[in-house]
Amino acid sequence: MTSSTFQSIPILDYSLSQGPQKPLFLNQLRHAIINVGFLYLKNHSVPASLVEEIKAYTPKFFELPQATKDKLRMANSQHFLGYSRLAAEITKGEVDQREQIDIGTEFECRYKEGDPIFTKLWGRSQWPDEADLPGFRAVVTEYFDSVATLSYRFLELLSESLGLAPDALNAFLRDPVDLCHRGKLVKYPAILPGSSDQGVGPHFDAGFLTFLLQVTDQPGLQVQNHKGEWIAASPIDGTFVVNIGKGLEAVTRNVALATSHRVLSPPVGSGPRYSIPFFQAISQHVRLSDYHLDFPPDVIELRNARGDTHVDSVNYSEFKTDYAGLANLIGRVKSHPDVAERHYPELFKKYYPNGMPLKASAY
């Protein structure tokens, strides 16, 4: 069956979901979830003042002295939380031209000897000293907590849009206070002459939902439609870009669409691009293949009419067979071999049998 395609990213007004126009919002959401896998969300519940605060802190973090940032290097952390220098991450075998710090919501690691290895993945973040960046930790923590709250409500609306009960996906979240969501602050510098323009290569996200705040006006985010064309998802002030992860696609049997996307570096001579993605976590101990969701016939018909849409960058296939925690851990190992080599040597040997890839940045 021939798939439909898209040429733009739909813009949804979250405020419509709170009143008499909720059916319209759910109809628009159903289209975005099934046929696009991406959407802009405006008039959301995260306070504008908080958004402006974290936007202001983002370039300030990257302006810290290199030695100060290096104290927080991700290789220190078995949780894959911390700072990565430019060109330290790999996507699809190529180096990403971005600098970033990965941060999780507050969580104490509960791993003990004999537990599944993937339970090491959740734990404490690394933070700059308060004296180096006053207020940074408080603002980032409050912001991520606020986006997490929005993500729970949005997941209920997503369930309703697909003809399910609002709490149909709650089993995958278990107790929300028992989750370690993660996010990152990212800097994409302008292309240097002769360098790659891969800010981050084509990929899918893990888990259920991603909420991306595009901090600056620099374009670069592109979404791959069903024909393999790259569609711009340029910044729109006051919005999040929301997209579907491979976990949600797997548990909905491809009703919800995870869509390949990438970021191109800003042009030579321009300023850097900053962004803040937030990745909604799901319980580590769930195996998505153990669950069966009963969708109404009209939703299944829409999925079938869309057809097969995956054109590039297949990853996180482990969600179809393994525990969600293991799927996430394998994704981290593939992206950050230096962290894997130090903290997960057996997995490192499995996925990098020839040792550290030459393209990985050493530091």
Image (spheres, rainbow, N blue to C red):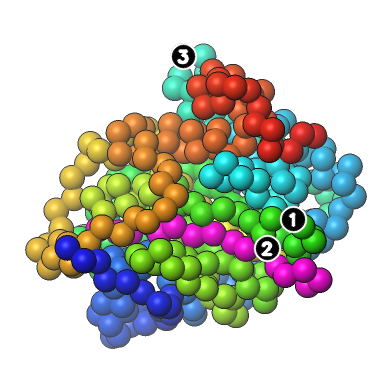
Q: Which residue has dot 2 on it?
A: 265
* Label of residue 114 in the image: 3
The segment highlighted magenta reads: 255-271
Is the N terminus in the top left, top right, bottom left or bottom right quadrant? bottom left
**Of helix, strand and loop, which one carries label 3?**
loop
Residue at image point 33% right, 82% down: 19
**Quadrant location, the C terminus:** top right
**359 part of magenta stretch:** no
| Contact between labelled residues 2 and 3, with CB atoms less than 8 Å apart | no
Answer with left or right where residue 68 lies relative to residue 344. right
Disc number lying in front (3 or 1): 1
Viewer-closest of 344 and 19? 344
- 205 vs 302, left or right, is right
Identify the residue at image location x=49%, y=78%: 42
Image-quadrant location for residue 278: bottom right
Taking the magenta stretch, the answer to whether it contains residue 270 is yes
Tell me whether the residue at label 1 lies in contact with that at label 2, contact meaning CB atoms closer than 8 angstroms.
yes
Please state if 174 lies on the left or on the right of 279 as rendered. Answer: left
**Sequence order check, earlier mark of 1 and 2:** 1
Q: Which mark is residue 195?
A: 1
Instruction: Please tell me in which quadrant of the rendered image residue 134 appears.
Output: bottom right
Residue found at x 56% / y 53% = 201
- The residue sitting at the bottom extreme is 20
**Residue type, numbered disc 2:** Ser
Badge 1 amino acid: Ser
Q: Position of residue 172 (x, y in %)?
A: 33, 45
